[in-house]
Amino acid sequence: QYERLINYYETDKMGIVHHSNYIRFLEEARCYMQDKSKMPYSIFEKKGVMIPVLGVNVKYKHPVTFDDVIIIKLFVKDFNGVRLTVGYEITNKKLLTLYIKSKKVGGCSEKTIYYYESSLNHLKKRAAKSFINLTHADIRDFLVFYQGLNNASKVTIDNMRRIISSFFSWLELEEYIIINPMRKIPHIKVEKKVKKAFTDKEIEILRTDLENGEGIKHS
């Protein structure tokens, strides 16, 4: 993956990155990928091989602004020996940071903040995708994996589900995503322990003890 800091001169009058700059970002990421693979453009050109770009298709989902850090993930979609199609995923590295700040403003304790942050980082590491590209299947796979890895109880897994649900609700509210994948992840049913009710005899004994000033006797 390729990380890049957004410069001030790359933003427009509205304070967001101008749409034309994303094409440059993709070119940077592609050159970076080739350099890391020990196959830079210079090697191809020395051999007389040119790599023209035949087309670009970009879908803009959410703007980024000055001082944001974007992460560009590349993957090969198709290669027939002559023509190469490269796919890209661009995400804002600060998404989790912004969410955590919102929880702090909401009055969450440091312990709770740490639990939220570590849980979401665990999800991202397991899924190996950006948050905005996660599906309900990815999240379900993570919950199953987490349960098996830690032999976690249903209560623990449901707590994890609630943390993830809170984060994706925030992403939806802030319009980073259109479809919330957590809508397809139901609550995890947890068996509730029902306390045994006092019998009439026990209630009568309790009432008598209280009237006699003897307090509650345990047997």
Image (cartoon, grey):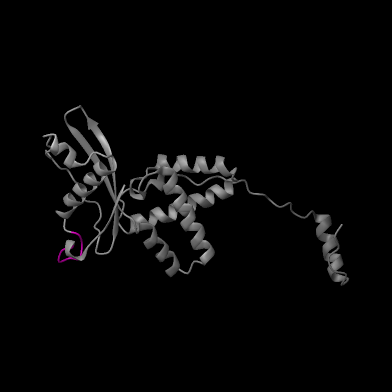
Q: Quadrant of the image for the C terminus?
A: bottom right
Left or right: residue 208 versus residue 153 is right
Left or right: residue 146 versus residue 99 is right
Locate residue 4: give its quadrant: bottom left
Q: Position of residue 113 (x, y in %)?
A: 49, 62
Left or right: residue 28 versus residue 185 is left
Residue 210 in sight in this render: yes
Q: Does the magenta stretch include residue 197?
A: no
Q: Where is residue 100 in the image (x, y as percent from the top left)?
A: 42, 62
| 18, 112: nearer the viewer | 18
Q: Residue furthest bottom?
A: 213
Q: What stretch is highlighted in magenta?
A: 11-17
Q: Where is residue 59 in the image (x, y as percent from the top left)?
A: 21, 47
Above/below status of 143 relative to 175: above
Above/below status of 106 relative to 24: below
User: Which residue occupies 44% across, 64% down?
Assistant: 103
Above/below status of 114 relative to 127: below
| 193, 60: nearer the viewer | 60
Give the main secondary structure, helix, strand or loop, of the magenta stretch: loop
Residue 59 in sight in this render: no
| 85, 133: nearer the viewer | 85
User: Which residue occupies 54% across, 63% down?
Assistant: 111
User: Which residue occupies 20% across, 27% down?
Assistant: 81
Q: How many labels does the image show?
A: 0
User: Which residue occupies 74% across, 53% down?
Assistant: 197
Q: Residue furthest top?
A: 80
Left or right: residue 131 versus residue 206 is left
| 36, 77: nearer the viewer | 36
